[in-house]
Amino acid sequence: MRMYDLIDKKKKGQALSKDEITFMVEGYTQGMIPDYQMSALLMAVYFRGMNEEETLALTLAMAESGEQLDLSEIRGIKVDKHSTGGVGDKTTLVLAPMVSALGIPVAKMSGRGLGHTGGTIDKLESIQGFNTSISKNDFIHNVNTIGLAIAGQTANLAPADKKLYALRDVTATVDNLSLIASSIMSKKIASGADGIVLDVKTGTGAFMKDEQQSFELASEMVKIGDGLGRETYAVISDMNQPLGRHIGNALEVKEAIETLRGEGPDDLLELCVSLGSYMLLAAKRVEAVEEGRRLLLDTIKSGQALEQLKKLVEAQGGEAKAIDHTDLLPKASIIERIKSPISGYINNIMTEEIGVAAMLLGGGRETKESVIDPAVGIVLEKRLGDKVEKGETLAVIHANDEEKLLLAKQHYLSAYQIAQDQTKPIQLIKGFVSADGIIRH
């Protein structure tokens, strides 16, 4: 088998076999296939596409290129959740305790943030002492003991995907649905879950800006999951404004705690309940989404979900007192209000710019080597559709550096469009995708 022949075959629009795709992925991962040949094949895929069988084969080959987590020692049906990334997205911090409080094992491998999107691991590490690098034995023990563990992804999880993505990033071949879907799902398959629930973001702060393309990506990933024996669901959610009001690691932990106390923002709770309902469905805990919603909301009212978060923090070495006393979380030295320059209604928010503003403060990474400041961030006072008067506070910036504060403020103000006419409210949940098809809202 020669890589030249595979490139030529795909260039002509023909489908590659499972063996050919395995040969390609293994050869490239092991350094036997050079970048220039893989670049040529990726460009051929970009223009010619991949069918369902090819996409499944690519996903499986990447999942099998490194370590695959064996979670068989964990009792019960394991269900994982993945978000395609957004601004203020702290759903795992709320969702994992809620679901585990109902007896569903949550064995979550999460990532760090890069660019304008935040990472769950960075948020959790803003709690003093919290350890996200626990051993596999401790990971499994914690899930079997308290029903919940959240750890960083191992370096050897789907290494083929990491190598291929780096090449796609510099060859303008990132935005192909089959390549995007197989990249995301290869890591989920390697993570060992029995069921997968996907939160596919759409809008100005999302990777997928176009709603129709978000549905198409969700459908592609659901097909992959089901095709590889994992019950898979997708929720398409809005990212035309940040999720909740807090952006920044410690600030988002605080908002997650408030939500588990029943005092958080409605949109964050609604998204967590929607995602959690499908997690319960995949775990065979309920037969209908509405039943799942009721059970999840009960974990908030009873305090069980908040107790689960305390158990998680304590089990992984964190300062559990911070859950009851959020003033123990890292705090910024500079607090400054951003005032509205004019009166009117907020009719558009460039959410990505707000994420960039938080990153510039030190709350995110411009490069993989960037050091995170857990205390900094932004708290929104005004959201889409809100009326604002000139001089009224739009947001509060939490900073530790005057120069970074100035840069972040400029980015934040450029993200808001204020007009005289009020816009219609945005629907948070755009729809759902399952093996049975698409439901649009």
Image (spheres, rainbow, N blue to C red):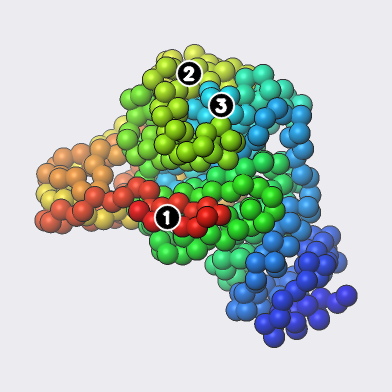
Amino acid marked by disc 3: Ser
Q: Which residue is mark 3?
A: 100
Residue at (35% x, 47% y) in the render: 428
Q: Earlier in the sequence, mark 1 or mark 2?
A: 2
Q: Earlier in the sequence, mark 3 or mark 1?
A: 3
Q: In this rendering, would 346 be left or right of 207? A: left
Instruction: State whether residue 225 is above or below residue 244.
Output: below
| Secondary structure found at label 3 | helix
Amino acid marked by disc 1: Ile
Instruction: State whether residue 172 is above or below residue 104.
Output: below
Residue at (78% x, 66% y) in the render: 18
Q: In this rendering, would 84 be left or right of 49? A: left
Q: In this rendering, would 79 be left or right of 62? A: left
The image position of residue 139, as x and y in percent, is: 70, 28
Give the alpha-carbon distance from disc 1 to disc 2, as whole Å: 32 Å
For this orientation, the residue located farthest to the bottom is 12
Q: Which residue is mark 1?
A: 439
Give the quadrant of residue 54.
bottom right
The image position of residue 394, as x and y in percent, is: 23, 42
Q: Earlier in the sequence, mark 3 or mark 2?
A: 3
Q: Which residue is mark 2?
A: 304
Amino acid marked by disc 2: Gln
